[in-house]
Amino acid sequence: MTSGSKIFTLLFGLSLPWLASASATENDAAAQSLIASLGRPAPARTVFAEARFMKILEQPRVSSGELSWLGGDRLERRVERPAKEVATIADGEVTQQREGRKPRSFTLNRAPQLQVLLDSFVALLGGDASRLDQAFAIRHDGSAQRWTLMLTPRDPRVAKAIASIQIDGRGNEPRCMRMQEADGDLAIDLLGDLAARMPAVPTREALAALCQGD
């Protein structure tokens, strides 16, 4: 990642066009039930592989490692490839440590949009639908077995950086996360067992097929 405001949106995808939408009331109830089922006791960890498509690069940047929720508002993203890097949020402070460099830190007071994202993903990991709804408009498509959640930021400050976050999953396990940034860049994360299937040279189409597959 290139900025602290985006680091922890990677904790968890593309739209499944054949899924029928429920009514608003049914959609809200289904989303709340699904989010509750995603809750995990801390510490919760999952491996990830990310392809980040940027306008300034001809090929996507690929990285892999482990994401961890350590309880409370403490999150960690540990990158193993292509270079070792650890980013953490704890006690209101963001710290980045890259191999061969001095660590750098800043407080969440300098990045209010990151505080919103932190609150939101702690809510998602904790299965707290009401807390998540405070920061995002939530749309649910699909069934309990095969589903998509679309999160659209309510806070204009967050929306200036992130247009939407879409999570694709099966049962109570998220498989993919797509973060569409407001500037046109796109990050797609494969999670858990699916991370091992990241192509050597990924394309948007190939990752969409993986996220939508059985």
Image: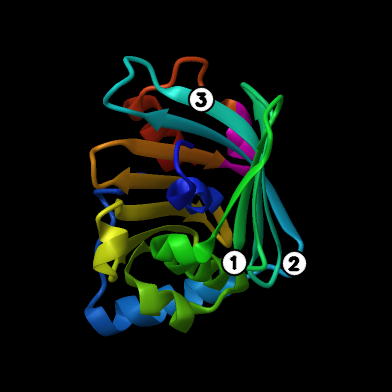
Q: Residue 87: where, in percent of width, then height?
A: 63, 45
Q: Determine the CA span between mark 3 and mark 2.
A: 27 Å
Q: Determine the CA span between mark 1 and mark 3.
A: 24 Å
Tell whether label 1 touches label 2 (CB within 8 Å).
yes
Determine which quarter of the picture holds residue 27: bottom left
Q: Residues within 10 Å of mark 2 (few under 14, many from 20)?
A: some
What residue is pinned by disc 1? 125
Viewer-proximal residue, 113 or 48?
Answer: 113
Q: Residue 198: where, in percent of width, then height?
A: 54, 26
What residue is pinned by disc 3? 62
Q: Secondary structure at mark 2?
A: loop
What residue is pinned by disc 2? 42
Q: Determine the CA span between mark 2 and mark 1.
A: 9 Å
Tell whether label 3 touches label 1 (CB within 8 Å).
no
Q: Residue 33: where, in percent of width, then height?
A: 49, 78
Q: Which mark is residue 198?
A: none
Q: Residue furthest right?
A: 43
Q: Residue 97: where, in percent of width, then height?
A: 67, 39
Q: Secondary structure at mark 1?
A: helix
Is residue 195 magenta-colored? yes
Q: Secondary structure at mark 3?
A: strand
Considering the whole magenta stretch, tell me its main secondary structure: helix
Viewer-proximal residue, 28 or 164?
Answer: 164
Residue 156 located left or right of residue 35: left
- Residue type, mark 3 in image: Val
Q: Which color mode does the image show?
A: rainbow
Q: Is residue 202 above or below residue 20?
A: above
- Residue type, mark 1 in image: Leu
Q: Earlier in the sequence, mark 3 or mark 2?
A: 2
Q: Earlier in the sequence, mark 1 or mark 3?
A: 3
